[in-house]
Amino acid sequence: MDLSFGAEYEAFAEEVRAFLRKHKNDSISSSLNMAGSGEEAARMKKWQEILVENGYAARTIPSEYGGYGAEPDLLKTVIIDEEFRKAGISRGLSNQGISMFVPTLLQYGTEEQKQAYVGPTIRGDMIWCQGYSEPDAGSDLASLRTSAVLDGDEYVINGQKIWTSTAVEADMMFLLARTDPDAGKHAGISYLIVPMDRTGIEVRPLKTMLGTASFNEVFFEDVRIPRTNIVGEPGQGWEVGRATLVHERNMLGDTSQTENMLKRCVDVLRDYGALESPVFRDRLMRIEARVLAMKYHAMRLLTDRLKQRHPGVAGLITKLNGCQLNHDICALAVDAMGEFGVLKRDSKYVRDEGVWQSQYMFTLGLIIGGGTAQIQRNIIGEIGLGLPREPKGPERTA
C-alpha cells in the first residue's frame, strides 16, 4: 500500500518546511492559549501578517478581500497542518472574527461589507465579539429579546447580551436581534454589525473561576447603527446565525490545536516520569486513539466542504468531541504532575506558567459554551439517529 502524497505534494511539503526554516526567528511557538497582550499580541499579529502574505493563513480567502486567494486543496491543507504541528509553530490567530465571522460574511455579506471587514479582521487589526446569548436565551437562542427597530436609515438597538467573550477588547460585534416582533420565533431575527464604540453600549466584565474576566455582559440602550449594517436580509438572521455557529463549532473542535496539546502533554508525562506507569500509559493510549479519530473525522468534514456536501449532524460531533477531549488531555497532564499540578500561576515551581491548570478549568467551561454537550447530544440523537424528542417540561408561570 502506497500512502505517500505523490511528487507534487511532497514538493509542497518541502516548500512548507523551507518557509518554516526561513521564518524560524519570526515564528510563534504553538501554545495551549493563543490569547495575549502587549508585546506578545504584537508578535502574534506580525506572525499573522507573514502567514497571510505567504498563504498559510487566510489561504483560500479571495485576494481582493485581503486573503491569499489560493484554490481549495484538501491535501495541501492537511500538509500545512502537519508540518506546522511537527515544527511546534503556531498556525496564527484563531478567534471569533477570523474563524467565525469572516466565513459567514463571505457567504452572506454584501461586496461593501466584505471590502470593509474581511481584510482588517484576518490581519488582526479588527477584533470581534459575538452577541448571541441572553439571560433568558442560551440553549433556546431563538427566544432572544434584544430588539433592533428601524428608524429611518438606522436600527435602534435595546437589550442585553451575556457570556460575551472579548467584549472589552473588541472593536466590533456581530449581533442577533429581533427586528420583527410580530413574525414567528425564528423568522423575526436579523444579523447585525455593531461598532462597540457606539453611544449607549455598556460592557460589564464577569469574573470566572479562573479569577479573570474572560466573559462580559453587554447592555444596549438606544444604540444606533446604519441599516446597511445588516448581514443578509431582514428576518434572515436565524439562518445566518446558524452558519456562524457551524464555524464556531469547527473552531472549538480544531484538530490542530488538540494535536499540539497532546504533543505537549506527552512532554509533561515524560518529564514527570509518568510514562513509566501502566496506568498513565493506558490513559495516554486511549486519548491518542481519540485524537486520531478526531483528526480523520475532521478530514472527512473538510472533504464535504470542498465538494460542497452538507455534513449533517457530523459537524456537531466535532465540537462535542473536541471540547471534552481537550479537557481530558489537560486532566492527564495535571494528574501526571502530581502535587505540582495544583500549583497557582505565580508559584515558583509551576510548569508552563500554570497554563495546564488554567486550561483544565477553561476547557471544562467550553463543554458548556458554544452549545452545551447535552444539547449537542440531543440534536445528534434526534436528527442524526432519529430518536424521539426529549419531553418538554411544564410551562413556567409568572
Image (cartoon, rainbow, N blue to C red):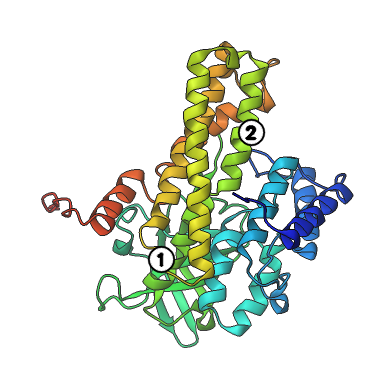
- Three-letter amino acid code at disc 2? Lys
Q: Secondary structure at mark 2?
A: helix
Q: Exactly how many numbered labels are in the figure?
A: 2
Mark on residue 263?
2
Q: Is residue 245 above or below residue 116?
A: above
Q: Residue at x 46, y 78 (%)?
A: 155
Q: Quadrant of residue 13?
A: bottom right
- Cβ atoms at labels 1 and 2 below 8 Å apart: no
Apparent side of residue 139 relative to residue 30 in the rendered image (left or right)? left
Q: Residue at x 80, y 44 (%)?
A: 39
Q: Is residue 194 above or below residue 281?
A: below
- Three-letter amino acid code at disc 1? Arg
Which residue in the structure is indicated by mark 1? 242
Quote the CA–CA distance across marks 1 and 2: 33 Å
Q: Residue at x 45, y 50 (%)?
A: 318
Mark on residue 100?
none
Q: Position of residue 386 (x, y in %)?
A: 21, 57
Apparent side of residue 366 relative to residue 336 in the rendered image (left or right)? left
Few, some or many residues within 10 Å of mark 1 (<14, 14–19, 20+): few
Q: Quadrant of residue 29?
A: top right
Apparent side of residue 3 relative to residue 228 in the rendered image (left or right)? right
Q: Nearer the viewer, residue 312 or 39?
A: 312
